[in-house]
Amino acid sequence: MNPTSIDNLNELKTVLEAGLLAADGPQTLKDLARMFEQDLSPDMLRRALEELRKDWEGRGVELVQVAEGWRFQTRAEMQPYLARLKNERPPRYSRAVLETLAIIAYRQPVTRGDIEDIRGVSVNAQIIKTLEDRGWVETVGHKEVPGRPALLATTKKFLSDLNLRNLAELPPLEELGNVLAPEAAAVAAMPAPSELIGDESEVLEEPELSPAHHAVVVAAEVVDDEDEDDSMPFSGALSAREQ
C-alpha cells in the first residue's frame, strides 16, 4: 500500500478500519479525511464506511454511526459477557437526576425554572452539574427574560452514549420508562406550563423507535431508600473503548 495515496476502495477501507479501531472516540468524516494526503470526497468516505460496516456484520464488534461520528463498538448482546470482565459498578444516578435528564431531552431547550415547574420541586444545582460533568447536558443560550436564565439542552455525546444519531431517534416516552425509570418517563410526559411550550405545535413529538435503537442497552433498577435521591444504575451501549 502506498503510504501517501489510496489507489482503491479496499485500501481506503483498511486505513479507515485501522483509524477507527485506534481512535478513542467517534470520528466524523472530516476527522477521517485528515488521515489522507489526497482529497477524498465525503461520498467516497461514506461508501467505504458502509462497506466496512457490512464487512463486520455478524461479529462481536460492529461499526456504527452515532451523533458524534463513526465508531466501532461491542454489540449489545455481548454486554452480559463483557460485564464479567469489569470489577467496577456502572455509574449510579438518582431519580431526580434521571427525571431532570428526561425533561431536558424531551422539552429542550429548557431553563432550570422550567424543569422545576414541570417536576413540581426545586432542582438542586448539583443535579445539573452531574449531567454537565457526564457530558450529557450543556448550556446553549439564555432565555430573554429578567435574569436571562441559561437554556439547557442535551449534547451529541448524550445521543452517542445511547447509540443514537439525532434527537428524532429518541424512544417514545412510554419506552423511556423501560430505559430509564417509570418516574422519569411520567414526569417528562407531564404537560409543560403554557409559558414554556406556548402551544401543542411546539411540543417535541414522540418519534417512531428507530430500528437502530435495538442496540441501546440500559439497565435501570431502583434501589430502595427513603428520599427522592434513591439511586439506580444507568449504562449505555458499550463502545470498543470507554467513553
Image (cartoon, rainbow, N blue to C red):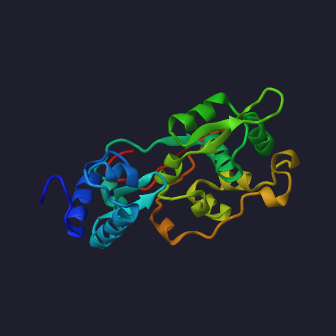
- Front-most of residues 1 and 67: 1
Q: Which residue reaches farthest front?
A: 39
232 relative to 126, above or below: below
Q: Position of residue 70 (x, y in %)?
A: 39, 57
11 relative to 128, above or below: below
- Front-most of residues 126 and 208: 208
Q: Is residue 145 left or right of residue 142?
A: right
| Residue 95 visible to an observer of this rendering | no
Q: Residue at x 54, y 43 (%)?
A: 136
| Residue 185 visible to an observer of this rendering | yes
Which quadrant of the view contains residue 228?
A: top right
Q: Residue at x 82, y 46 (%)?
A: 196
180 relative to 209, above or below: above
Q: Which residue reaches farthest top?
A: 147
Image quarter in which the N terminus is found: bottom left
Which quadrant of the view contains residue 80?
A: bottom left
Q: Position of residue 45 (x, y in %)?
A: 34, 62
Which quadrant of the view contains residue 167?
A: bottom right
Q: Is residue 45 left or right of residue 8?
A: right
Q: Position of residue 164 (x, y in %)?
A: 50, 59
Image quarter in which the C terminus is found: top left
Q: Residue at x 74, y 31 (%)?
A: 149
Q: Residue at x 76, y 43 (%)?
A: 119
